[in-house]
Amino acid sequence: MAPHRVRVDALAPQMTLGPRETRHLHVLRLREGDEVRVFDGQGAEAAATLTRLEEAHAVLTLGERLTGAAETPQPVTLAVALLKGDKLADVVRAATELGAARVQLLVTRHADAREIGAQKLLRLRRVAEEASKQSRRAVTPEVLAPVPLGELTWQGKLFVAQPGASARLTDHLTWDAPVTVLTGPEGGLSDVEVAALTTRGAVAVTLGPRILRAETAPVALLGALVATGV
């Protein structure tokens, strides 16, 4: 069985865990002397030994540095419209597994949700952290508070998933700069929104002949993207 993975703020000779992470160690019935893996969410990972385990805190002693799982050739941002219910949690989880470096939430014209509370944003960030543990990534994506679509900025290239587009992602992807991929809400992006993005240099791309659900489209787009960069 693979050692339990623990997210820490930074790798250090001695690392103290708070109540939340310590509870996981108790649930897993770990004991002093057991080995775990620690990662800082920025790409650094190492072995560590559980040297003290108390009710509300634990201490880890740093061991050998390890090579984390390979990341994409350039950082990838997923820009996704706000969705209702728990759909965003599913998207953030999949985006983490697929290698996104950050998730930028968006407010768009047809979005069913117009804002997100502080507690829900915190929950999405914890979803990303747990998904990075599960997928054995040493990087935990940032989940950024929503911005209006017109205020979105990006580095490198932006690809927008849009039904009816003729361009294919693989025809324009070169991995010579950071990449952002963008998907809309259940009602889709308006023609005006897409035109404003393409005027600023974005490329509208097809995801095939079918209309995908708002929570499916970002997974499909990221999957197509990541498959070219492994």
Image: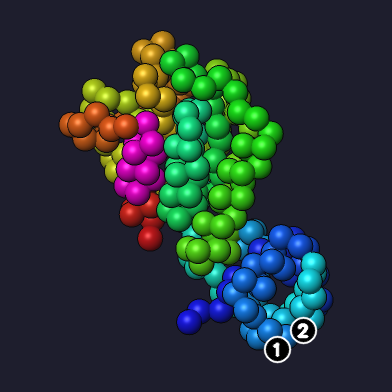
Q: Considering only vertical position in the picture, is 210 above or below 170?
A: above
Q: Is residue 19 left or right of residue 163?
A: right
- What's drawn in magenta, residue-wise? 214-224
Screen quadrant of the C terminus: bottom left
Secondary structure beneath label 2:
strand
- On the image, the x and y values in percent for residue 140 come to 59, 55
The reply to whether residue 120 is visible in this rendering is: yes
Residue drawn at 66 percent across, 72 percent down: 25
The main secondary structure of the magenta stretch is: helix
Can you name the residue that lies furthest to the bottom here? 33
- On the image, the x and y values in percent for residue 152 come to 57, 26
Q: Is residue 51 left or right of residue 210?
A: right
Residue drawn at 44 percent across, 37 percent down: 87
Determine which residue is flagged by label 1. 33
Whether residue 41 is in magenta: the answer is no
Tag 1: amino acid: Gly
Residue drawn at 48 percent across, 63 percent down: 135
Q: Is residue 211 left or right of residue 30?
A: left
> Disc 2 vs disc 1: Cβ atoms closer than 8 Å?
yes
Secondary structure beneath label 1:
loop
Which of the 4 image quarters holds residue 18? bottom right
The reply to whether residue 180 is visible in this rendering is: no
Determine which residue is flagged by label 2. 51
- On the image, the x and y values in percent for residue 83 come to 47, 29
